């Protein structure tokens, strides 16, 4: 990655090197859309969309913030055509996008691109669905829009490749780049031409936010809904552009564009962002556990250690981290004793202790009362953190050492298991059961999966049942 700022590029009708970066990216991705997405990409989009909807349904009855968000969005009698997943509510498109993105991320179970460190589908699918019914769009267009929005987000995030510090490290990149990805997804569903989409990205840029203090600090429940701001802003930008409002086309690489204002002037090479072959988004994985992704190597190591010991450890627990993971360990005392479920899922000391205590991490165990779990808290009190591991993009390496009567035992993990297609289907089934659907859960999952293959988006949305109670 270079750190030179590119000047504004005023020639929109030249080659890719002669036009603003936002226009070049829109042209590249629109060309893919017009040619038709490969079946491999559409199949992955269906799988990730199914995962996203299942998570959103599971979140509704599980977390107070789900009803808090829906109630807030209805203040003043807001009503519209946008369905809220799992309920009878209907909201204007931008608010529906907010509600559904909040539900999709609330459990911290949504898909993630590890090098980019962002959750793409939790922004782009709600944004695409929010405008699908009034646009009379089919599901193939919705899924194509979602995949292209994901590609835009993941290309930008992977180019930043954030670590513990440096460009991108202080932003929720899901939120920052999600304004652009959500905007592109909504614009494609709305069938906007290139000129309007470029303008929409400029309007999305004008709303950008995503400072990470809600994650680095403790006590805020809003950390669980930050992608929703991007989904809402992206939809609003697309609708404003559709109506004729013009945004700046140099929003990304202009003199006061995104790279300078938000990323300290560090601008990736254009060639990397505009490379035609391949799909950066396909490196996105479905999560196996409902907690912050940076905690996952520690969960994996703790589960392996618990299996090896056959019981929770009795002695001291030392967790080695790198600079990225260390930010989820400070302040240590409060990370050991989280006050909210969001803090618990974002704490490496607590998630390590929780996995050691129970030998499993899932929706059944890591619920709204998890931060009061006595066994996990007792173990977390014995967790010591040492920052000794190398930092880099993607997963942090994990090393956990426990003292036993036979001497120290250490387990290391640098990777995390990724569910395959059948594993995702099983995860969705579990989400539906936690949403309150018992015997009917398999039929609901299969019906949703079938409606993702084709037909109107309205039919897919109609197939999503209301969560009991």
Image: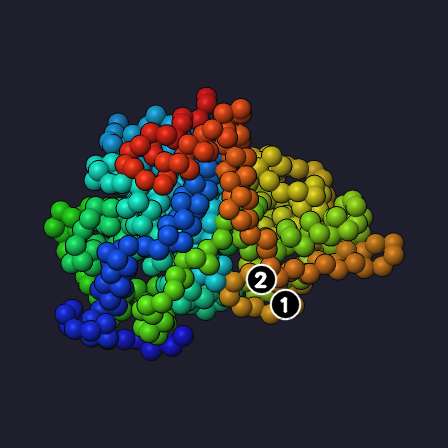
Dot 2 falls on a residue whose secondary structure is loop
| Residue sitting farthest toward the right | 406
The residue lying toward the viewer, choosing from 45 and 356, is: 45
Mark 2 is surrounded, within 10 Å at the Cα level, by few (under 14), some (14 to 19) or many (20 or more) other residues, namely: many
The residue lying toward the viewer, choosing from 336 and 356, is: 356
Looking at the image, residue 457 lies above or below residue 403: above
Badges 1 and 2: C-beta atoms under 8 Å apart? yes
The residue that appears at 79% across and 58% down in the rendered structure is: 409
Looking at the image, residue 17 lies above or below residue 244: below
Which residue is labeled 2 in the image? 396
Q: Position of residue 405 (x, y in %)?
A: 87, 54
Q: Position of residue 359 (x, y in %)?
A: 70, 43
Residue 389's disc number: 1
**Disc 1 and disc 2: Cα gap in Å?**
8 Å
Dot 1 falls on a residue whose secondary structure is loop
Q: The N terminus is located in which quarter?
A: bottom left
């Amino acid at each position: 990655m270079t750190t030179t700022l590119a000047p504004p590029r005023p020639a929109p009708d030249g080659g890719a090197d002669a036009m603003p970066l936002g226009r070049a990216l829109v042209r590249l991705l629109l060309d893919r859309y017009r040619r038709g997405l490969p079946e491999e990409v559409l199949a992955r989009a269906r799988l990730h969309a199914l995962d996203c909807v299942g998570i959103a349904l599971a979140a509704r009855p599980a977390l107070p913030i789900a009803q808090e968000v829906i109630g807030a969005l209805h203040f003043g009698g807001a009503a519209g055509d946008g369905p809220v997943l799992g309920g009878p509510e209907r909201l204007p498109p931008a608010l529906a996008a907010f509600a559904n993105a909040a539900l999709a991320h609330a459990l911290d179970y949504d898909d993630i691109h590890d090098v980019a460190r962002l959750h793409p589908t939790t922004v782009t699918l709600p944004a695409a669905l929010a405008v699908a019914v009034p646009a009379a769009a089919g599901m193939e267009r919705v899924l194509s829009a979602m995949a292209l929005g994901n590609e835009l987000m993941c290309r930008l995030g992977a180019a930043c490749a954030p670590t513990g510090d440096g460009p991108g490290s202080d932003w929720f990149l899901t939120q920052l780049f999600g304004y652009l990805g959500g905007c592109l997804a909504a614009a494609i569903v709305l069938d906007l031409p290139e000129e309007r989409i470029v303008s929409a990205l400029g309007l999305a840029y004008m709303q950008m936010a995503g400072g990470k203090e809600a994650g680095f600090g403790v006590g805020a429940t809003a950390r669980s809904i930050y992608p929703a701001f991007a989904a809402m802003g992206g939809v609003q930008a697309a609708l404003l552009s559709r109506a004729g409002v013009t945004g700046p086309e140099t929003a990304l690489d202009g003199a006061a564009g995104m790279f300078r204002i938000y990323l300290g002037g560090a601008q990736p090479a254009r060639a990397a962002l505009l490379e035609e072959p391949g799909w950066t988004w396909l490196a996105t994985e479905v999560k196996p556990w409902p907690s912050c992704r940076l905690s996952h190597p520690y969960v994996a190591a703790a589960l392996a250690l618990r299996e090896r010991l056959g019981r929770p450890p009795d002695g001291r627990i030392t967790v080695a981290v790198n600079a990225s993971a260390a930010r989820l360990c400070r302040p240590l005392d409060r990370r050991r004793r989280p006050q909210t479920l969001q803090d618990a899922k974002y704490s490496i000391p607590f998630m390590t202790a929780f996995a050691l205590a129970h030998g499993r991490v899932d929706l059944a165990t890591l619920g709204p009362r998890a931060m009061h779990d006595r066994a996990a808290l007792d173990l977390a009190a014995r967790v010591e953190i040492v920052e000794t591991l190398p930092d880099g993009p993607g997963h942090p390496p994990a090393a956990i050492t426990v003292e036993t009567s036979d001497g120290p035992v250490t387990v290391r993990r640098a990777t995390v298991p990724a569910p395959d297609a059948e594993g995702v289907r099983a995860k969705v089934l579990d989400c539906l059961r936690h949403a309150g659907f018992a015997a009917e859960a398999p039929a609901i999952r299969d019906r949703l999966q079938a409606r993702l293959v084709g037909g109107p988006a309205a039919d897919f949305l109609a197939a999503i049942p209301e969560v009991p109670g």
